Image: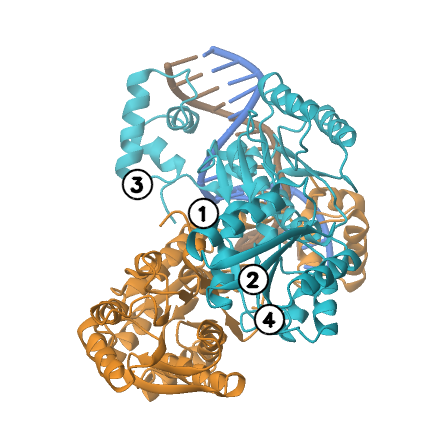
Chain colours: A orange, B cyan, C brown, D blue
Amino acid sequence: MGVTIRQIAEAAGVSRGTVDRALNNRGRIKPEVADRIRQIAEEMGYKPNQLGRALSMSKNNIKIGVILQAAETPFMQCVLEGIERAKDEVDSLGGTVLLCKIPHISGRDTIDAMEHMRSEGVSAIAMVPIEEEEIKAHINLFVEEYHIPIVTFNSDMEDTKRLCFVGQNAFQCGRAAAGLMGELVGGCGKVAVISGYSSNPSLSNRVLGFGSELKAKYPEIELVGPEYCFEDNHLAGQATEKILKENPDLKGIYMTSHGEEGVCRMLAKYGRAGTVKMIANDFMGKNYELMREGSIHFLIGQDAQIQGYEPVMILFRLLFNGEQPKGELQYTEIFIRNEYTIPENL
Amino acid sequence: MGVTIRQIAEAAGVSRGTVDRALNNRGRIKPEVADRIRQIAEEMGYKPNQLGRALSMSKNNIKIGVILQAAETPFMQCVLEGIERAKDEVDSLGGTVLLCKIPHISGRDTIDAMEHMRSEGVSAIAMVPIEEEEIKAHINLFVEEYHIPIVTFNSDMEDTKRLCFVGQNAFQCGRAAAGLMGELVGGCGKVAVISGYSSNPSLSNRVLGFGSELKAKYPEIELVGPEYCFEDNHLAGQATEKILKENPDLKGIYMTSHGEEGVCRMLAKYGRAGTVKMIANDFMGKNYELMREGSIHFLIGQDAQIQGYEPVMILFRLLFNGEQPKGELQYTEIFIRNEYTIPENL
DNA sequence: CTGAAAGCGCTTACAG
DNA sequence: CTGAAAGCGCTTACAG
């Protein structure tokens, strides 16, 4: 079972409170005594029991706020599952998670949510930021003035005082797609990129990573596009048709974003589904289905749940144990899946 | 914070002990009272606090045994890390993990370890089994006579009373490799398989999965081999040389097992490294290095840590909460990595 | 069948 | 600077 604080107290001939003060550097203790106790604890191989600690501290009630943007999208639903998992864990450890889902993307609502959470007395916030100066200023205000640490997830906000970021390295994601595409098409020919919004930094970084790596590693591949489809199947189909007409010898398409169905339908219409090699992002919607039927060759994605789970737990560990996050940029793993590695529960 | 057992007791006008008996079906309680309490708990939205529960139960000291085979191999070292992580978690929840590392593969030692664990009073065992009748009988003996549940990991032992298995679906792993290889070589030409031991069921299943899927999906690919290299670099090199001489037009090699370095060295010697497409297994040894330099195109593998972590936690959850495992076969996810998706901490 | 009490390992006011 | 005591939410003998 392990050494307890009581055993150390007995061995040192002091009270348990004194051992606690020594081991947790709470001050109000004679330094020599503290040293002696620490040494005894060390010798006895003391490891604090997290259970006792947590139960005792559950009086304090660590409260963590979470702000989610575009909460209705399928991707965010997966992120939400991760948040719920973290919430359960935090609950069972005596804390509380306060969740605020913003249905679309709104700077105004985001700031309102932050203020609401502050008035509710949260000790930390995990949030999806928005590229606006006002949000940026508000994050810094919270961190510096109110001492409420903030973790960003999904999108980062680099030049702020946020504690860390959890999400995908979009540029690297694009490079991984390039590595796959290069091999799929045998290192030469025409390859197109279809993206969602030119204004979205994550998507742009995927496009950039894809293009730059293709150029570096497969110089004989000719890049077509990017075309933008605004994550709409119909527009994605139109873009595909345009590309096919202008490039009848097209060998591959990389989609950074949604609209896959529209693309696949159009490829099928032209009798090119399966022969035009296709790589898409994220494990949701009909993507697995399209991969099973052979229209999509590879899917690249991340564990969306982790993106919800980790930010909350990073903050909880910080508040509960004083444990600092491992690094400022916590990139989620980039998964590559083909039709044989589709998880079974889907 | 949530409703406590004390609040329910007050609301119901009974003692906390009575509430406990009602909510946990411990008997020795008038059924009507129990029903009423359960209803009140339901209405108040009671969710038991795991912390209080765990701390209180830590008197009982749940003890879980783990038996590891071939503990010195790199793969098992990773599995071991997962076991250590589970051990820490179990420790901090008031339990104990008793670990026994068997350096090589020995049925005798395995049975000794099982008996040792029983004499130490473990309540459950996670183990790597060995294909021997005596082991099989012993597993059934433990489960049925001693009521010590057993989870197998790494290798399964299907026709026993073991609770469940955690590990890779080797056949599917081979199929995933076939899907990759088929695309890498453009769907035609000669592809070789080099395996480790013909006697190892996991490796054989990879070979089978690879071969059958290639045949089904890429009928124009001609399969060469399998050759066996006994996980030895020198022998793997020799096998490669033989294959290259007999098949100068070889387009790809799938390695089910170790010896990658030997293969890559031989390919380099013949000036074929990078052009002969290579797929290997497991994220260890020099594999990432070989992938970075372009000799290996894809690596297929699993989260070895999960293979150590999950079996222990499955048993802990069973003993602590009565939580049953989700299924009898818990296949670990099959990861595909290329040079762009190598985790950063390596 | 039910209650009162002690205990799990830790933290935290409160006295001194 | 130090100790004695109460408390976190739950379980578990022990009485009755």
Q: Amino acid at mark 1?
A: Ser
- Judge if badges 1 and 3 mark residues of a common chain: no
The nearer-to-camera label among 2 and 3 is 2
The circle on residue A92 is 1
Q: CA distance from mark 1 to mark 3?
A: 14 Å
In front here: A266 or B212?
Answer: B212
Q: Are marks 1 and 2 in contact (CB under 8 Å)?
A: no
In front here: A35 or B106?
Answer: B106
Residue labelled with disc 3: B45
Output the chain of dot 3: B
Residue labelled with disc 4: B344
Q: CA distance from mark 4 to mark 1?
A: 32 Å
The circle on residue B268 is none
Q: Amino acid at mark 4?
A: Glu
- Judge if badges 1 and 2 mark residues of a common chain: no
Q: Mark 4 falls on what kind of element?
A: loop
The circle on residue B190 is 2
Residue B199 image-quadrant placement: top right
Number of residues whose C-alpha sits closer than 10 Å to that of mark 3, classed few (under 14), some (14–19) or many (20 or more):
few
Task: Estimate the x, y position of residue A253 in percent, counting from the top left.
Answer: 35, 76
- Judge if badges 4 and 2 mark residues of a common chain: yes
Q: Amino acid at mark 2?
A: Lys
Quadrant in which the C terminus of chain B is drawn: bottom right
Tell me if residue B346 can be seen. Answer: no
